C-alpha cells in the first residue's frame, strides 16, 4: 500500500466531512441551538478542514492507485470519517464517552442505525442534522462521491469504487468510472428529493423530512424521534417510507434503466425477482402470524408487518411497532431477514439477495450431483452460467459472514445479559440493520453495552459495510508491503 497516495485521497474525504459539519453549524444557528452544540460542530468542522489541508499539502504529487490502495482508502477513509465525525457529539456533551461517540458516527456512516442516544427530541437540531448527514454520505458512499468529483483519480477511481460499492458485481454503467459515480449519485439525489417532498406533504417539518429521507435512502434508520417512525402514527408516512426503503434496497442500476425508458428491466433481473418474491412472502407470513395474536384487524396487521418486514430486510432499521413482543415465529423470521439484506448495487446491507440466490442454486446443484455424480450442471442466474470462480467467491463470502456472525455472538456474550441480545447485536451490526432483539430491541438501544463491547461492534459495522474482504485484507502482512 502506498501510504502517501492513500492519505492524499483521505484528505479530500475529510474536506467533504468538514464542509458538511459547517452545514450542520448553519442549521444549529438557524434553530437557536445551545452554545455547546454550536461549539461541537465548529470544532469538528475546524479540525476536519485543518487536518484535510495539512494532509493534502504534505502528500501532494502524482497519484497512481493499485487495488490494495483502494482497499486502504476505503478502510482508513471510513475510520478517519468516523473519528472526526464523532467530535460534534463529544465536544457538545451529547455523548460523554469517546467510544460511544465513535460508535454513533460509525453507525451513521455504515448506515447501521444502531444508537446510544436517548430522548432524541431534546437533542440540538444541528446535531440531529449532522447525524442524518452521516447516513446521507454513507448510503451511496462518500468515497464514490470523491470518485465523481476528483478527476485526477482517473483509473485509480476504479479501485476505490470496487472497494466501497456493495455487492459481488461492481458493474460500471459507463466506460468512465467518474461518469458511473456521477450517475449513481444523481439517482440517489433524485430519490432523496422526491421522498423529502412527499414526507413534507405528509406534515413533517423540513428538518424531519430531510433527516428521515437520509435514513431511508441510505437504509440507515436514524430518526429524530425516540419512537422512530412510530412517533408520527401516520399510515401515509408509513407507506411513503416503505416504498422508498424498498427502492433503496433495489439495485441502482435498475433505477437508471427505468429513467432511460426501460421500466421492465426490473422484472427481467433475476435478483430483483428473487428480492420481490422473498419480500412479499416474508411480509405476508408476518401478517398471518400477527393477525389475531397481536392485532385484531387485517389492515393493522398488514401495515405493521409490511413496514417492519421491509425495514429489516432492507437493513434500514426504522420501527413503528415493538416487534420484540411479536410471536416467536415472527421474531425468528425477522432475524433471518437480517441476513438477507438488499440487492447488490443498492444501499442495503446484509449478505445480498444475489449471493443468497447463487448459494441456494449451488446447494441444489450439489444435491443433484450427489444423485448423478457424472452429470455436468452449471449454476445459472438469468439464463446465463455463473463462472465457477464467482460461485466459489460467493460461497466463501457466505461462510465467512456466518463465521464472523457466530464469533461475534460469542464475543458479545461477555458484554450482554442474555443470548438473544448477544446474537442479535452481532447480526444487527454486521448486517448494518441497527435494532435487534431483547436488550437491543425495537424500543431499546446500545447505551448499556460497555465501551469494549461497543468497540467490537464498531468493527462489525465496518466489516459489514465494506463487505468483509475489504477490511480483512488489511490484517494480512502482504497488504502492507509496497
Image (cartoon, grey):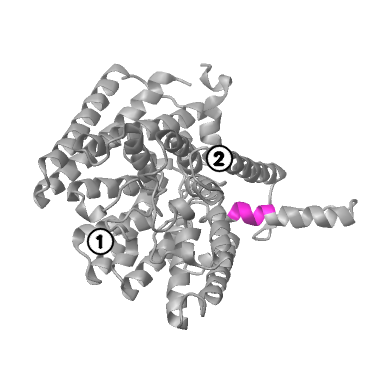
Count the marks: 2
- Seen at 30% across and 64% down, the residue is 194
Which disc, if any, is residue 408? Answer: 2
Q: Position of residue 155 (x, y in %)?
A: 45, 33
Most distant residue in the front direction: 417
Main SS category, magenta section = helix
2 or 1: tag closer to the N-terminus: 1
**Category of crowding for the residue at label 2, using alpha-carbon neighbours closer than 10 angstroms: few (below 14), some (14–19), many (at least 20):** many
- Seen at 46% across and 77% down, the residue is 295
Q: Does any portion of residue 150 appear in the rendered image? A: no
201 versus 150 height, above or below: below
Q: Which residues are magenta?
A: 354-359
Q: Does any portion of residue 432 appear in the rendered image? A: yes
140 versus 206 height, above or below: above
Direction from residue 75 to residue 39 in the image, left or right:
left
Q: Nearer the viewer, mark 2 or mark 1?
A: 2
Residue 93 included in the magenta stretch of the image: no
- Seen at 33% across and 60% down, the residue is 228
Label 2: state its secondary structure.
Answer: helix
Label 1: state its secondary structure.
Answer: helix
Q: Position of residue 445 (x, y in %)?
A: 38, 50
Q: Position of residue 51 (x, y in %)?
A: 25, 25
Q: Position of residue 474 (x, y in %)?
A: 52, 27
Direction from residue 65 to residue 116 in the image, left or right:
left
Which disc, if any, is residue 209? Answer: 1
* Residue 40 sits in quarter: top left
Residue 357 included in the magenta stretch of the image: yes
- Seen at 42% across and 64% down, the residue is 322
Amino acid at each position: 500500500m502506498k501510504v502517501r497516495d492513500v492519505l492524499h485521497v483521505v484528505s479530500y474525504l475529510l474536506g467533504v466531512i468538514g464542509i458538511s459539519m459547517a452545514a450542520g453549524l448553519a442549521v444549529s444557528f438557524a434553530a437557536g441551538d445551545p452554545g455547546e452544540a454550536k461549539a461541537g460542530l465548529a470544532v469538528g468542522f475546524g479540525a476536519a478542514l485543518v487536518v484535510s489541508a495539512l494532509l493534502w499539502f504534505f502528500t501532494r504529487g502524482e497519484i497512481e492507485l493499485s487495488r490494495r490502495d483502494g482497499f486502504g482508502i476505503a478502510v482508513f477513509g471510513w475510520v478517519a470519517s468516523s473519528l472526526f465525525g464523532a467530535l460534534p457529539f463529544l465536544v457538545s456533551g451529547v455523548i460523554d464517552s469517546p467510544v460511544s461517540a465513535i460508535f454513533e458516527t460509525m453507525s451513521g456512516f455504515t448506515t447501521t442505525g444502531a444508537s446510544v442516544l436517548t430522548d432524541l427530541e431534546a437533542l440540538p437540531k444541528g446535531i440531529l442534522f449532522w447525524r442524518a448527514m452521516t447516513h446521507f454520505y454513507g448510503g451511496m458512499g462518500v468515497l464514490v462521491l470523491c470518485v465523481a468529483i476528483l478527476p485526477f483519480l482517473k483509473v485509480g477511481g476504479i479501485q476505490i469504487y470496487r472497494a466501497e460499492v456493495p455487492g459481488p458485481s461492481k458493474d460500471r454503467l459507463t466506460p468512465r468510472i467518474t461518469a458511473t459515480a456521477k450517475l449513481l449519485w444523481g439517482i440517489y439525489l433524485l430519490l432523496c428529493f422526491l421522498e423529502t417532498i412527499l414526507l413534507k406533504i405528509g406534515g413533517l417539518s423540513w428538518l424531519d423530512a430531510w433527516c428521515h429521507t437520509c435514513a431511508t435512502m441510505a437504509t440507515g434508520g436514524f430518526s429524530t424521534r425516540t419512537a422512530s417512525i412510530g412517533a408520527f402514527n401516520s399510515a401515509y408516512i408509513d407507506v411513503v417510507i416503505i416504498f422508498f426503503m424498498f427502492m433503496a434496497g433495489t439495485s441502482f442500476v435498475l433505477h437508471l434503466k427505468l429513467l432511460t425508458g426501460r421500466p421492465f428491466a426490473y422484472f427481467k433481473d433475476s435478483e430483483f425477482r428473487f428480492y420481490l418474491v422473498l419480500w412479499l412472502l416474508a411480509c405476508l407470513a408476518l401478517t398471518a402470524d400477527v393477525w389475531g395474536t397481536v392485532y385484531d384487524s387485517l389492515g393493522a396487521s398488514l401495515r405493521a408487518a409490511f413496514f417492519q418486514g421491509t425495514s429489516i430486510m432492507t437493513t434500514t432499521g426504522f420501527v413503528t411497532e415493538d416487534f420484540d413482543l411479536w410471536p416467536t415465529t415472527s421474531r425468528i423470521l425477522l432475524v433471518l431477514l437480517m441476513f438477507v439484506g438488499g440487492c447488490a448495487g443498492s444501499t442495503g446491507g446484509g449478505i445480498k439477495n444475489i449471493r443468497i440466490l447463487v448459494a441456494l442454486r449451488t446447494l441444489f446443484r450439489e444435491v443433484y450431483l450427489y444423485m448423478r455424480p457424472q452429470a455436468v450442471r452449471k449454476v445459472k442466474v438469468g439464463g446465463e452460467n455463473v463462472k465457477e470462480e464467482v460461485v466459489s467467491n460467493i460461497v466463501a463470502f457466505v461462510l465467512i459472514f456466518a463465521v464472523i456472525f457466530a464469533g461475534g455472538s460469542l464475543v458479545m456474550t461477555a458484554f450482554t445479559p442474555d443470548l438473544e441480545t448477544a446474537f442479535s447485536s452481532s447480526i444487527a451490526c454486521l448486517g448494518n440493520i441497527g435494532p435487534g432483539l431483547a436488550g437491543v430491541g425495537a424500543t431499546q438501544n446500545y447505551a448499556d453495552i460497555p465501551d469494549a463491547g461497543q468497540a467490537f461492534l464498531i468493527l462489525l459495522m465496518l466489516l459489514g459495510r465494506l463487505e468483509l474482504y475489504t477490511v480483512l485484507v488489511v490484517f494480512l502482512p502482504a497488504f502492507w508491503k509496497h
